[in-house]
Image (tube, helix red, strand yellow):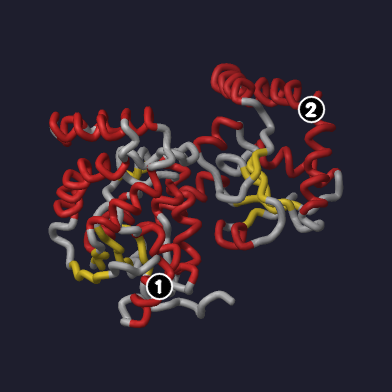
Amino acid sequence: MAPSLPIDPFLAAGGALLDVRTPAEFRQGHIPGAANLPLFSDGERAEVGTLYKQQGRQAAVLRGLALVGPRMEALATELVAWSERSGGAPLRLHCWRGGMRSASVAWLARQLELPVQLLEGGYKSYRRWVLELFEQAWPLRLLGGRTGSGKTELLLALQALGAAVVDLEGLAHHRGSSFGGLGLPEQPSSEHYENELAAALAPLAGAEQIWLEAESAMVGRCRIPAGLWHQMKAAPVLAVERPLQERVDHLVAIYGAQDPLALAEATRRIAKRLGPQRTALALEAIEQGDWATACRQMLEYYDRCYDHDLEGHACSAVDLGGLAAPEAARELISRGLVTLRQPPAG
């Protein structure tokens, strides 16, 4: 029988990480770095599950064997290929609860003399680990600043210098506004967003400071997990200040290359909050390709939102006008506002 490992040694082990759940389960959320090697298709799993409920375990097992049997050789070939790519390290397998699906694939691997490790409790235990991680106390610091202040670029520059950083927007594939998804990949589900956040946060245990961008509870369609969000609301904020023109230039550089129709649609989504006059001026500017004017029409609204979101936070400000992200990062470190977890790379 293949050994079952608790979540921490399972995640720390080398070797290919194979999720044998269905494609739909995998899309909803999976362990970051895992590959999907489904034992059943979505429809097949539903069929076997219905049989189990209506006729019992034996009928479900027989039907499962009938479905998998014709694919056994192809499945075995994939296991061998994954083992070769992993240099012969044990294959790490899991299903939903550490039940029959992962045990069946592990049995097949053993017939091929491939070493295997199973996740104790399956993906369900991993999800419990993820949510418990967010309930732990973390030394959070928030980087704030009005829209266009270059907060994300600054965080990434700090990370490159050795600061402990979690990029909430990068993991969500969204910049956090009505325009935030333009030009970016499709967003993950909130479940998988939590998984990605946990994978980014766990290695930072022991850091003196962990920096995140000041966000609302939703980053596009991705919800920041409650345990982390409650800590963010109580975390101190370092607010970046830059001149208005710098902010406008930064936004034009990001959004000026986007599809004007998509920009106009994103503007209409916040029309009630912008008001009819600003909306009309912004839409006209977009139509004319005047990105700077369009940005200026929307900044007052976003600035009001930002000021409201900061209420109740312990907040200090730092003027970084005229400094590109790498220089700004070094300035924060030299002032002692940001502490490094490790020496700069290189």
**In front of the other: 183 or 88:** 183
Q: Secondary structure at mark 2?
A: helix
State the residue at coordinates (50%, 66%).
203
> In the shown orientation, is residue 24 left or right of residue 135?
right
Type of amino acid under label 1:
Glu
Q: List x then y, in percent, for residue 295.
A: 27, 43
**In front of the other: 76 or 153:** 153
Type of amino acid under label 2:
Arg
Against 44, residue 182 (above or below) is below
Against 328, residue 291 (above or below) is above
Q: Closer to the camera: disc 1 or disc 2?
A: 1
Rounded to the nearest angstrom, the CA distance separating label 1 from label 2 is 57 Å
State the residue at coordinates (61%, 41%).
95
**In front of the other: 294 or 305:** 294
Number of numbered tags placed on the structure image:
2
Q: List x then y, in percent, for residue 30.
A: 54, 43
Label 1 crowd bin: few (<14), some (14–19), many (20+), radius 10 Å: some
**Residue on which the image places disc 2:** 71
Contact between labelled residues 2 and 1, with CB atoms less than 8 Å apart: no
> In the shown orientation, is residue 61 left or right of residue 331?
right
Q: Which mark is residue 239?
A: none
**Residue on which the image places disc 1:** 327
